[in-house]
Each structure stands twice: as structure tokens, then as C-alpha cells.
Image (tube, rainbow, N blue to C red):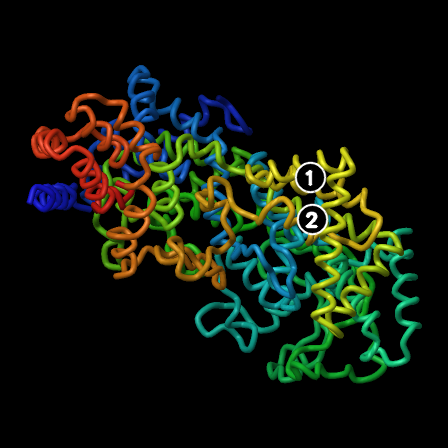
Amino acid sequence: MAIRAWMGAALAALLALPAATAEPGGLPREKMLAAAREIDRLVEADLTAAGLQPNAALDDPSFIRRAYLDIAGRVPTAKELADVLAAPASERREALIDRLLESPAYASHLFNWLADLLRVKSRLQNNISGEPYIHFIKESLATNKPWDVFVRELLTASGPAHQRGHGATGYYLRDRGMPEDNMSNTITIFLGTRLECAQCHNHPFDKWTQLQYHEMVAFTGGIRYTDDSLQKTPEGQRLKEMGEAFRAAGKDRKENLEFRAYRKMLQPLEYGISGSGNGLYRLPKDYQYEDAKANQPVKAKAMFGVEVPLAVEIPADRKAPPADKKNPKKAPAIKASDVNSREAYAKWLTAPENPRFTTVIANRLWKRFFGAGVIEPVDNIRETTKPVNPALMKHLETTMIAAGYDLKQFIRVLMNSRSYQREACRKEPSDEQPFRFPGPLLRRMSAEQLWDSMLTLVVPDVDSTLRKPGAAAEAVYADYDRLVNVNPDQLKAQVEMEVLREKDPAKYRELKKKQGDEARALAKNDEKLKGLMEAAKAAKKKGDEEAVAKLRAEIQAMEKGPLLMPDMQAMYGKKTGPANGLARASDLPQPANPGSFLREFGQSDREQIEAAHADSSVPQALALLNGFVDKTILPNAKSAIRQAADAAKAPSDKVVSIFRSVLSRDPSPKEREIWAPDLEKRGEAALRDLIWTLVNTHEFMFVR
């Protein structure tokens, strides 16, 4: 009865919220604070003109919670809350913002946002690993790479996808074989404009023509979704000679099992991006407008802004180009010399003079921290689109450029504004009454925020579990290097094994077991190998993928026979995440598996740009009522929240500890009156009831 009464009071309190609910980069502290004050002046002037008032200032505990959720992606612990509150009142907010922005959790949480925006996946098409791409993004965030530099590196990326240092190729490989889709996505993500309608006809609701669409695609003309750089190296030539030997061994290529096995083994070496761009693209065969002809090659041309200088020559067609058998409507590629059109494309798109690039990233980040954009929708800007506050939008653009596209510094400006530090609004924006930012919008936690906040209740010092940016990619890099440097005897032995697997599976399994036994016997008799195996096993247990990959490479170098790494892997345990799978959302597979906690609460499947959602559902309620909370938090006496509560002696102090851990605030006198006697009377059972109740409140679920 006490639980129901308290939950009713908590919900009523939530609904009573006010209606309408260091010196980094190129922007020194004084200018950063001045930019924040200018935001306040522009927002408040707009509110006054509309006859509105700004919301009241947020109290310190609520601000601390909001800052943790928006920067670190999780709620603060009770100790973190107390530490911030212990600082001088005049310094605590700015100091907290600085500390969180410099924490590893900042890059972790911003990655979640970028992964949704860029449709990041751990596994790309044709079994291409997405981990090097993820490594590139995480490393860029960890090193605070400027946004314009980051985007240029994506658009100009080339090289082998699985080799260290070429993770940016994942941007094009995400849309492998679909340059048209990639261009449409690029313009939507970075310029906030939708062009996909113009792929088949002139845009019915905007000014873009089908010809302009294909002129934009021409910037990536000639791109190849394989890496041909290895062929020019001694290692590549050696591998090619090995392949020729396998090919010569069989007359029929389809029946030549040895050659097929060789190709399958070395296929990962071919994944990558080649071609700097020839600046040409052929119009589709069904093109019907008078401004060009069907099948006609067109040169790359920017859709707006400054003209992009490119020395492009259209080659003479000696005969009609052959049709694509798989896609007859698709325009055949044009063979021409590269002219670095992708680099020109990247420079044009990211230039401060580009009328959309700065606007879009500033507007996207504003929406991320305020719940709505100054321009809505953020990804469908047209000539007729007007910001709700034009002066504010202009100031945000100027601030972004002054900061040198330093996202961290731009976020610092937003969060130091009074506008951000006001109580949340419950009123959603509409066409009739545009949202003018009397305070940020009240919004439900994202799936990643909710998951990481749950982990904060379970795992002590949860941020320390974050892996290094490239930890999961280390195995991919090691395998690439292993294949590049494989010796003929090892390759021949492995090819024979692959052929045996297809011809005689039973014998194959028997031989694999024998090889495993031999490897274990070798490990027992070779002290160096034994030490490496033990070290690999320990690293695997800790979840240190980087150390495991390096040790695997050393083990591989000692082997005399075929490539036994799959057997070796079994010798030091199966792959598991840190803390038995209790990893931050950014360290889990991207995206999480269907039916998982993250997917149930709205994590995107990464098929569409920014497809995450915060819609409620029955499975979500069940997951909170009798899922993760019941199975992972409540029965775990060593969980972070239980340890904090156990450190408090009196029942009243335990109540305070739990409230601070879950809701980041002290209980009200009424709440303390309800729960303290209950804890004194029922002990452990009441403690679990209190945790369960608080986690299931709307107050916990929302960024307020």
C-alpha cells in the first residue's frame, strides 16, 4: 500500500512541472561565456516578443543529473552527486561541465548519437567488419577531432578496410555498391537536405532536378569498393603468385576447390575503397527531361554555393555501354582517369562558406541538448525554411565557426547558457505554436541513456569499464596482418583444411581436434608459448581485446603448421564483454540484437538515418517491472547501489542513499516518512521494494 501511495504522489509531482515542461579549441573561456550569454539574450528577447517568460532556473541536483545524462549518457552516482554539491556554488556547474566533457564517458555517449546518425553497424555488407569504422569514429571523438576534418576524412577515405588506419572507409562501405544512396545520405546528414526524390524525377516539393542529383553523384564517380593497393606491394605479388599456383592445379575454375578456398581465405584483403573520383556519372537510360539525354555522361557540379573547379574530360563513347544484368535501369560506369573529385567534393561540402554545413551541425547539436531544433525538421531544410529564431541560428553558426568546428567547445557554450540550465518544458512544439525555448524540452531517456544508467546502479565506477576506442577492432587488424604475411606452407595447409571441410566434414573435425591437441601439447612443452597462452587467457577474461589481439599475433608467429588461430582462440576462452556482458552501450555490438533491452527501448536498427525513438510499449514496461531490475540489480548484493546503501547505517540514511543513486535528489519529508519505517521493519525486502519502485517511476525515465 505504501508503494502505491508513494508512486501516485511521485507521478503527481512530475505532472506538476511547469507547463511548456579549461580553454580548448579556438574559443577561449571569456569568449565561450560571452557566446553563452548571447544565447540567453537572443532567446529571452524572442520570448519577450512572443509574450512568453523563460522557465525558472533549475536547482543544482536536477542540473547535475541533466548534465550527466546529456554528456556522460548516464545518471550520476550518489557519491558523484555529493562531490559536485560540495564544491562552491559559484563554481560547481561550470566545473562539472568541464570535467564531464573531458571524461571518457563524453566520447562514449556522443558515439551513440553519431552511430544513429551515420547508421553504424558492427558488421557491414559481405561480411566486412564495421569495427575499424567504429574505431575511427570513437578515436575521432576521443581526440576531439574538429567536425569539418572528421567529415572530410570520411568523404576522401581510401585503402584496405581491415588494415589499421583506414577505418574511415567504412563510411562508403556502409553503402557498398550504392553511390547514389551514399550521396543522398551524405547530403541529408551533413547539409540537412533531402535529394532522394530527385534520383528518379525532378523533386516535386523542392527546387532540385534529376540532373542536379546525378551531377552530385558524379563527385564519387569511379569509386571502387575494393582495395587495389596491396597488389602493388611485394606481399600482394607473393599472394597473387600463390593463387596462380592453386588456379593452375585445376582445369575447371568452378570445380577447383583449392582455388575457391584460397579466394575465400584472402577475400578480407580485398575489402576497401579505391579511386579518388573521376568526376563523371552517366544518366539513367530512362532519363526523359530536355536538359540532357539518356545515357549521357555528366560532370560533377555542386548543387549550390561556390563552383567547384575540376578538370574533367568526358571520354568519347566508341560503342553503347553494356547494361547491368542485375539492375538494367542502372547507368553503366564510365571509365576515365581520376581527378580527385572526392577531395573537391569534401572541401566544398565542409567549407565555412557552404550555406548549409555549419547550420546543420549547429542545429543538430542544439536539438540534442534542447530537445528541438531552431530549424525543424533538422534534415529537410528548403529554400522556404525559416528558423524559429533567425538571430539565434545565426549566432550558433558564428559560434561554431569561431570554435573551429570543435564540437566539445560548442557543447560547452550551450551548457553554460542560462537557457540550458532552466527547468524543462512539457509542451511539445507544433506548427501552430513553434517552440521558443523557455527551457529544454522534457524528454524520455534514449535507449542508451537508460541502459547506461541501469549499469551505473550495478557496476561500481562504470566509466572505468569503457574499452579503448579500437579494442574490438584489434582482432580485425591482427587477422589482416596475419593474412598479408602468411607463408606458403601455412597457406597451403589451411587451403587443404578448407577443401577437406567441404569434402569430408567428419574427417575435418577429427583433424581439427588433433591439431588442437598438438597445439596444447606444444604449449605445455614450450615455456614461451605457454606464457603467451596464459597471458592471452588472462587478457580475455578481463575483456582486453587489444592485448588479446597482440598476443594472438605472437602465438601465430610461433606456429609451424596451418593457421590454427580458431583452435587457439578456444584455448583461452570464449569472447565475452567486460563485467560479464555489462558493457556500456557504446561497447556493445552495433546495433544491439533484436529483442535486447536497447532495441526494446528504441535503439535504431541502423537502416535509416536517426531512426531511434522514445515511443513507449508494453515490452518496455515488462522489462522494467520484472526484467533487468529484478534479475540484475535487486539480487546483487555487490551492486553499486546496494554498496552505497549498505554503507549508510540508519534506515533514513539508506533511503537518502537510494534516492540519490536513482533520482539524483534527496527524498521529500513525506517520502522519508513512508520509506524509513518500512526499511526498519522489513529490512532487505523493503530495500528491494524501494529500488524497484524508484527505477520504475517516470521521474527516473525522463531527462528533466
Q: Amino acid at mark 2?
A: Met
Residue that sits furthest to the top in the current view? 88
Q: Position of residue 136 (x, y in %)?
A: 62, 45
Q: Position of residue 108 (x, y in %)?
A: 48, 40
SS for callout 1: helix
Disc 2 crowd, CA 10 A, few/some/many (<14, 14-19, 20+): some
Which labelled disc corresponds to residue 533? Answer: 1
Q: Are marks 2 and 1 in contact (CB under 8 Å)?
A: yes
Q: Position of residue 271 (x, y in %)?
A: 72, 59
Residue named by callout 2: 568
Q: Quadrant of residue 60?
A: top left
Q: Nearer the viewer, residue 135 or 192?
A: 135
Picture quarter with the C terminus: top left
Q: Is residue 112 above or below residue 206?
A: above
Left or right of residue 319, residue 7 in this image: left
SS for callout 2: helix
Left or right of residue 55, residue 214 in this image: right
